[in-house]
Structures are given as structure tokens and as C-alpha cells.
Image: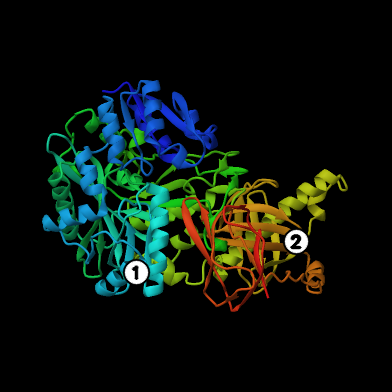
Amino acid sequence: MFKKLLIANRGEIACRVIKSARKMGIATVAIYSDADSKSLHVQMADEAIHIGPPPANQSYILIDKVMDAVKTSGAQAVHPGYGFLSENSKFAEALEAAGVVFVGPPVGAIEKMGDKITSKKIAQNAGVNTVPGYMGLIKDADEAVKISHEVGYPVMLKASAGGGGKGMRIAWNDEEAREGYQSSKNEAANSFGDDRIFIEKYVTQPRHIEIQVLCDVHGNGVYLGERECSIQRRNQKVVEEAPSPFLDEATRCAMGEQAVALAQAVGYASAGTVEFIVDGTKNFYFLEMNTRLQVEHPVTELVTGVDLVEQMIRVAAGEPLSIAQENVSLSGWAIENRLYAEDPYRGFLPSIGRLTRYRPPIEVAAGPLLDAGKWQSDVAEGATAVRNDTGVYEGGEISMYYDPMIAKLCTWGPDRATAIEAMRVALDSFEVEGIGHNLPFLSAVMDHPIFIKGEMTTAFIAEEYPDGFEGVRLPGSELQRVAATCAAMHRVSEIRRTRISGRMSNHERKIGTNWNVSVQGESYNLTTEADHDGTTVLFDGGIKLRVAGDWKPGESLAVMSVDCSPLILKVNKISGGFRIRTRGADLKVHVRTLRQSELAQLMLEKNSPDMSKMLLCPMPGLLVKLDVSEGEEIQEGQALCTIEAMKMENILRAEKRGSVSKINVGAGDSLSVDDVIMEFE
């Protein structure tokens, strides 16, 4: 076995690999850019080597710099993680030439399956169903439009060397095909150094289901079940689960056998993923093979008890697989939510800054990394597990240079409903402050009827949130639970306030019991009756709720119960009440005396300034292109400029007709949120 392993990556996946290597007794080496000098993966590794400036194309994906770090460290093997150089055959060749083991598949398998055009042809020759499309190289936008007509709209334009949603666009007409071709090429070149694009039919109402395979150099191969990855935004997975709520055992077996056969046909040896698109009648079509570890691998680990990173390392060391297909079993259900530094209230645009607060839920019996596999058999009946794969810490910064992922929060339960409920509690307990993030959106998905029924497709977000995410409106019964809890918490705050002021010796008799609580447009008059064990809240109309918990003023998380049912609230004090966040809702809750409530109705509301004649930068990023000039007449929907942030291009468009009166920035400028890019008249 190897004595020293270098991880050619950063962030949460570097931390994840370090955990398995440490468990195996292998020393680890981290590499880092200027932006990552204080990152968690650097702190966790046994040693760390600096490789260059922040941009990935000047550090993490420069083979020469990574090879210098390998030679300096004396590492015997390199794990590439995912992204960056993980599917770069030239990197694998450089390692082989240096006598260093690449913890991944052979170079030939990377070349054949890592290229989407080549892999699709191989799949066709192997008898695997594939999506109709054009696999040849496309020379320009005009040819892209012509091919799109031949294939038939809608089409998907995809980067040949792509992955992770980069370099992918859906086109429904000629204009979108032309525009998508150029954007896909740009993203592909920036992310992978390869701007080749191909086109295939976009299957409507599809489900994205992938098979995890594991093969060794001795000809053995197994599949470890499937992952449902249908909830995606801009072709980037957001929620994954294992197994899929859609597949039956026969379909699972057929997909798994095809996946293993395809892997073995190219001499694959390592962990890999064969991705399929599945229609409503369970017909499945090969999409691509990812010749690396997938972001969502934890859910497979949680339902199988197999440490995939450990298996990759052992296969790379020449060991045969220790499991056969008949030994693979799926136990319980696992769900993964990707926590991104993206603001759902601003169209999921990237957010950067310092994590002023970062408190994940406590990990509980989180699978093979803690208990070396087979952990489910030791879990008490009805118990759940929580796992959080992350690469950040409180006080750290989220950079504009890399992927916006903060963490991968996973839960496991004996069945799907239990795993979902465990995830709801975990999301409510996850505290993140200082940046925009998608926690509220993830909570909303976990409560969405379509997700609960397991009937989602890859169009879920576009169809259910066509106008973007605007937060959650809690049902009346849940609002009453929040109102009752805030009334009880307000009473505790008032007791603390009177004690600090020293104005009264017997504060309990002075604290009021009649309150008005206003939240999300609802107003409740209620009475509180407190005792040593909690507070009974009686609403006008007769509803009575019993609130209990040990929350104290100043605490940012309130773990409460209402009528013995848990309620977890993120709490911030505001004038006259609390800012409460729970289950995807962001609420201002005002708790007032009845007289204060009457007076509050008379207060005037402040009007927001008119910004309709300005184009504001919605995210921090680089202005890579201006599409209009001063004095130009513009039409609704016309592209105005392109902002690049976190490896993605974002085109800003005109919301209505008008003319450009002033442009305040130029191509190449770095912009902050709400910078005025241009003005209209």
C-alpha cells in the first residue's frame, strides 16, 4: 500500500480523500493556490505545497505545476478528486511517466470514455441505447443551427470534455442554438481547456439516473446501485438520493449490467459512473461516463457501507475487489443536498464573502468513514444518520475563483420518508451567515409534494419555480406554531431584559401575558401561561399549543417543541421581535402588546428607490463582454452583457424596450453586487 498520497484538488473533495487516506494510515499532501492558503484541506493534510495564483488555469489545472508538487513531496500516488485534472489523460500519462500511480482508471479508459463524443460511439457499438444526436465536431454557430434543425428542437449543446453542468445549454430555437453554441464553447475552454461541442436531442420530462460502478485491474466489476439526480438547476445537480424512487429491481439490474459491461469493454479499473436518461416508461439511454469519483458518491456509501475512496486507492495499488455482485445490497435510503454559495432570492447568482457563521448539524453514525462499513446493522430501529462533507469553516472565505459549493449535507434513514424528515431537521439546524446560500431553497424542495411523491424530473426547478425562488409561505398551522414559539421566546427575553435593567425585584409578576404576534401577513392575539416546564399559548378562537425548549436570549438556534413535535428555528433579534428562518421561510415576527399592535397599524411604510432605469450587477464577477453601446436602442430580452463568476457565464438581458444612455464599466472590469453597469432612458 502507498505511504504518501497527494490530492490534486481542493475544497470538500480534498478533505474527503484525506479522511479515507488517514483511516488507511496513508500520509497526505495538499496543494493550494494563493486563495486557498488557509483552506480546510490545507489544514487537514500532513503537508501542503503552494502551486500558484488563484485562477485554476494558473494553478490547479496546470499539469507542470502539479507535477512539480508531486516530485517535491515524494508522493507515490495522486488522487485527482473530481473536476480539474480528474479526467485529463495527459495528466495521467505524466504521472505514469514519473512512476507515480494515478488513483483512477487507465489512460485508455479516460480517453475513450472521458470524451463524450467518443464514449457515445463506443456505447452505440456495445449495443447500449443512446440519445439521438450529432457526434461530429461543429465548426461554428451556423453549423450548430443547421444540425439543430436536423436533430429537431429542443436540443442540448454539450462540451465534449465537460462535466458538472459546465459548457451545457438547452436550445429551443435558432437564436438560442447560436447563442448557446458560443457560451458553451467559452465555458468549455475556460473550465477544461477543450472547446469542442456536440449536439444531441433534448429528451423532455426526463429523469437523470446514474449507476455507480467499481472495477479492478483483474477483470472484476460490480455496480453499487443507482443514484437519482433529477433535481438540477442549469444542468447542475442540487439534490441526489439513493436508491431512486422510480426504478424497479428489473430496470436497476438491466442498467447496472449494461454499465459494468461498458466499463469492462474499455478496460476500466477504479470507481466510475455511467449516467443514463430515463423516460416515464423506464426506457433508459446512455448519456456519458464519468471516469472519476462523483460529487454525489456519499449517498451510495451510505446505502452500501462501501468507502468508494478507499476502494479507489486499493484498486490503484493493484488489489482485487473485496466484494462480488452478490454481496452488494442496498440498505435504507440516503439523500444529499448540495449547499451552494448562491443566493436563491437573486436568481441563484453566486455569492462570495466571509462565513461569519458556519455551524453544520452534528454528524451522527455517518457511514463507512466512521464505522468501516456495515454500520446500518448497528443502528437502532428508526434511527437516522447525518453526514456533512465540507471544505470550509467559520471565518473562512468563499472565493470567486472556484465552484460555489460549501458542503454536501447527507442524511440516511431506514426508508425514504424517514431520510427526508431527517434532512428537514438537518437543514433547519444548519447555520450559515455572511453570504447568500441556497439553504432556504433546499428546505422548500424537501417539503414539495412532487419531491415527497418521488415524481420529479430534470425539469422540476424550471417548472415549479418559473419565476425564481421567492421564499416559502408557511401554511396556517405552521405559522401558529411559529407564533406560539416566538411569544414564549419573547417572554423569556422580557424576563432577561428586566433582570438586566434591575428595575423590578419580582419580574415574573410584571411580565405581560397578553400579546399580538404578526407574521407573514397574519395577526394573532394570544395569551401565554408559563410554568417551570414550558409555556401554554392560548389563541383567540380557542386553539391551545404547548411550547417547550431551553432557548436563551442571544442564541441563534432555538431547538423547541410544540405539542411534543419538534420545531427548529434560526433566530435573530430585530426591533419588536425576531427574524425567524425555518423550513425555507424567512420571517419577520413581531411580538407586541395589544396597544403597541394598534399603534403599529398607523406607521407608514418606506418606499424603495426606483432602480428600474439601471442595470445592476447581480453578483460579484468579471465583465467579459458588452453587447450594446451608449445610445443604442434595445429590445426586451436582448443580451446586454456577460458576467463570469465561479466558472460560469451569466448573460444579463433587457427587461423591456428602451435605449442605453450611459455605460459605466468596460470589458475586463471586476464588479461587485449592485454596481451600476449601465443606465437607460
Residue type beneath disc 2: Thr
- 128 to 51, vertically: above or below: below
Q: In this view, does 142 lie to the left or right of 266?
A: right
For mark 2, give the secondary structure: loop
Left or right position of 45 against 281: right
Is 496 located above or below residue 543 in the figure?
above
Res 481 → quadrant: bottom right
Find residue 358 and name its label.
none
Is 57 placed left or right of 671 in the picture?
Answer: left
According to the picture, the residue beneath numbered tag 2 turns out to be: 513
Residue at 18% in and 41% down: 268
Quarter the C terminus occupies: bottom right
Q: Which amino acid type is marked by label 1?
A: Asp
User: Residue at the spot x=46%, y=38% of the render?
Assistant: 58
Q: How far apart are marks 2 and 1 (CA)?
A: 73 Å
Location of residue 255 in the rendering, given as x and y in whole percent from the top left corner: 18, 56
Q: Nearer the viewer, residue 418 or 430?
A: 430
x and y percentages locating residue 536 in the rendered image: 64, 59
Q: Is residue 410 at all visible to an observer of this figure?
A: yes
Q: Residue 581 location, x and y as percent?
A: 59, 57
Q: Which residue is drawn at 87% across and 48% down?
A: 504
| Quadrant of the snapshot with the N terminus | top left
